[in-house]
Image (cartoon, rainbow, N blue to C red):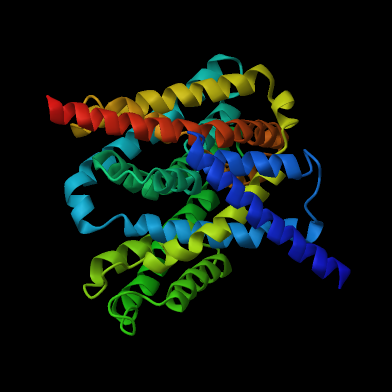
Amino acid sequence: MTDFATGLIALGALFLLGLVADQAGRRTRLPRVTLLLACGLAVGQAGFDLIPAEITALYPMVSVIALSMVAFLLGGALSLQTLRAHGTAILLISLSVVVVTLGMVSLGLWAMGLPLAAALVLGAIATATDPASTYDVLRETGADNSFTRTLKGIVAIDDAWGLVAFSLVMVIVLALTGSGEDGQVLGTAVYEIFGSVALGVAVGVPAAYLTGRLSDGEPLRIEALGLVFFTAGLSIWLGLSYLISGMTAGALIVNLARHHTKAFHEIEYIQWPFMVIFFILAGATLDPSMLLAIGPMGAAYVLLRLIARLVGGWIGGALAGVSPRQRPWFGPAMLPQAGVAIGIALLAAEHLPEFGSYILALTIGATVIFELIGPLATGFAVRKSIDAEGGDRAR
């Protein structure tokens, strides 16, 4: 009973800590994501080590629940109205950012002397983002303009592009190293991407017609939770991406459910408590000592990714005909990077054991940096986009 009581006390303290971080974020320009991660660092193993092991053990489950909710909400941002207005920009900017990031980071690290195979893998890892941090910053700002609507769409499909990029890179790398696993990697990627979309369709189509019938156009809270848990659980059981499945289901529900007034209103209500625990525990698992391990090559990776995001966002915005005042801000808004990148790094380490420890150390070290500065950059970019939109109207 003592351990049970300790766990409840710790959970209560973490929720109250989240409330303090939320209020501090409202009174400053610091995103609450950054504040929650910093709180996690302080109370986690890297700091005062105050979180019981029983609570830390909940992190995998909490992260799946929180990210699945984010996936549904991002999918809900892909309404036909948004796609008609911003679909070209979403497609071109997301592709541009992925291609430029992959090319610039890979070539830059290779030019600095890193083996080509490792440089290509790190370039692919650099394409991954953190949809949870980005979405929460957007929600916190309350901004709703052409920039934020486009950014939500980009974030929704960005990790799918990143998975494609990583899979193609691994095929090339495994061919270069002669391991003979390239066909297996490509087949796994095809299964994960198309299987996740198929599962999202299988859940989303009936859910669009069945939910919201008992509550005057809005799904009940229990319906929302049921969809999130059911989709995430099936995805993990089948070895699929719960992010892609959730986004697909969310997009279908918001577009097919004509009787819905606010398809994901209930998810927005219940999401934040899960996000508080998720971000604090994510901060508690960050290891700042890894920053010392990444060395000059890690610093170069961080700098190259930062520049690549800026350049890729600007090029994509130019190709899509986005306002010149908004083009510079898509790249900074997509700086956060977290669990998806580490997941890809783990896969790379499994297939390339000769570079595995180095790739993992560099990725984890860089993640610490991008998780702390990324939300700040996203918030800054959103504020600049609001100023830019005001300037365009004034012209």
Residue 348 shows in the view: no
Q: Is residue 115 above or below residue 252?
A: above
Quick one: which residue is furthest to the top in this view? Answer: 112
Instruction: Residue 9: name its quadrant.
Output: bottom right
The quadrant of the picture occupied by the C terminus is top left
Q: In this view, does 173 lie above or below 87?
A: above
Q: Which residue is drawn at 57% across and 38% down?
A: 34
Instruction: Residue 294: name its quadrant.
Output: top right
Q: Residue at x 71, y 34 (%)?
A: 354
Quick one: which residue is furthest to the bottom in this view? Answer: 214
Q: Where is residue 291 in the image (x, y as percent from the top left)?
A: 70, 27
The quadrant of the picture occupied by the N terminus is bottom right
Q: Is residue 249 above or below residue 154?
A: below
Residue 298 shows in the view: yes
Horizontal side of 35 relative to 226 (left or right) equals right
Q: Position of residue 136 (x, y in %)?
A: 46, 48
Q: Position of residue 134 (x, y in %)?
A: 45, 43
Quick one: which residue is furthest to the left in this view? Answer: 395
